[in-house]
Image: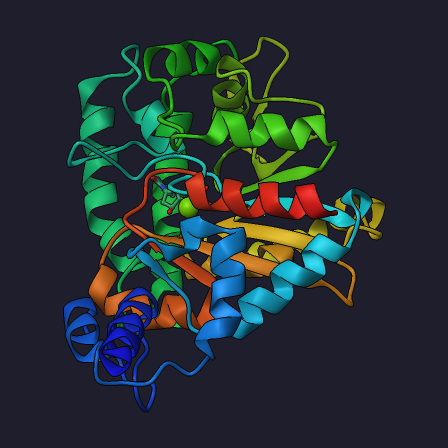
Amino acid sequence: MLFLMKRVLFCKVEQIYSFTTLGKVRSVSTVKREGCFQKPSTPVAKMENIFTQIPELKRSHIHIRDIKQVEQKIKDLSQGNHEKLQVITDFDYTLTKSHLNGTRCTTCHGVIENYSRLPASFREKQKQMFEKFYPIEIDPHLTVEEKLPHMLEWYDEGHELMLQCDLVKQDFALMVQENPTEFREGTSALLSDLNQQNIPVLVFSAGVGDVIDEALKISGLMKDNVKVISNYMEFDENDKLIRFSSQLIHMFNKNESAVRNASYFQELSHRNNVILMGDSLGDLQMAHGVEPPSTVLKIGFLNDKIEERLEKYKDGYDIVLVNDQTMDLPHAVIKMILSSA
Ligand code: TMP
Ligand code: MG
């Protein structure tokens, strides 16, 4: 009986963490099926501790390569006081949902794309570009070097198209009113807690800063502890859009962008406890500017091409959330850290 109970416990643990032998890439379903026959690499007693503190970690769509390391990082973050913590988060498909009722949500570029004042031809071209380039961005078989020229082409063509649209500064508030961004469930509660505790939040995005600012404002999320680093537009004296700022932030150069924004990180040099949230492997570089020695707990949202990318996400992110459109887990972790700090 005791043997059976232990067996059941191992099965559950294996299913949650999808342990693999020999680090092979395997599909989620295979991993889950075979999991019952493998021994977990971390003692169950150890896990019970963190599970008790953060029961949300038990959910079956949450994947962790190294539970011991996660436990240690959460312990380190909990031991630091509030003054040591900062949050760095991506915007599109991280603060915002990637899907809603089976339909893809818009990115901040998509908000511009859907603006009613712009011609249908603009919308059509932007849509075509998304359909062409987004699959390249998330292709698990291409290297960053192979993706890069396509990503740059995407930005070049997209920006060129926008510059032809006679946009003015005031359009950005209007387009966000027309197409409010779908923030993940629980984003407002999470940001409100962080604001109350004066924890700095950096929104670090390869999207469009002007849209992000308006989207945060309209949802009441643009608080004084929130800073946005993104691609901003430049306007002439009549508020007409004339160009994008020269230093492009794309999905795979967030490390260089962090260096360019060194002053932000220097000001927070005493805050070397970091919660990082992203949906792309490029987002892992967002904490590049944080002063060492640092503890960075990385939480990744895996929204697309799940089976093909899960192993790589587990390599890069400490905690991977598969097809989760909420902030439940990050909020639970942050609440735990703030309550014990
Ligand atoms: P993020 O850094 O906030 O995630 O923003 C980058 C996302 O922007 C990227 O995953 C794809 C999206 N994007 C568009 O939707 N349309 C575009 O034209 C471009 C260049 C990017
Ligand atoms: Mg993103």
Q: Is residue 93 above or below residue 114?
A: below
Q: Is residue 259 visible?
A: no
Quadrant holding the N terminus: bottom left
Q: Residue at x 49, y 73 (%)?
A: 45
Q: Residue at x 30, y 31 (%)?
A: 106
Residue 73, by quadrant, is bottom right
In the image, residue 29 lies at what x, y percent? Answer: 15, 68
Q: Residue at x 62, y 59 (%)?
A: 74
Residue 281, by quadrant, is bottom left
User: What is the tally of numbered marks visible in this picture?
Assistant: 0
Q: Is residue 98 above or below residue 122?
A: below
In the image, residue 252 lies at what x, y percent? Answer: 48, 59
In the image, residue 2 lies at what x, y percent? Answer: 28, 79
Residue 222 is left or right of residue 83, and the answer is left
Residue furthest out toward the front = 1
Q: Is residue 3 above or below residue 160?
A: below
Q: Which one is nearer the viewer's eye here, 287 or 38? A: 38
Q: Which one is nearer the viewer's eye here, 166 or 257? A: 257
Q: Is residue 121 above or below residue 69?
A: above
Q: Is residue 198 visible?
A: yes
In the image, residue 234 lies at what x, y percent? Answer: 59, 26
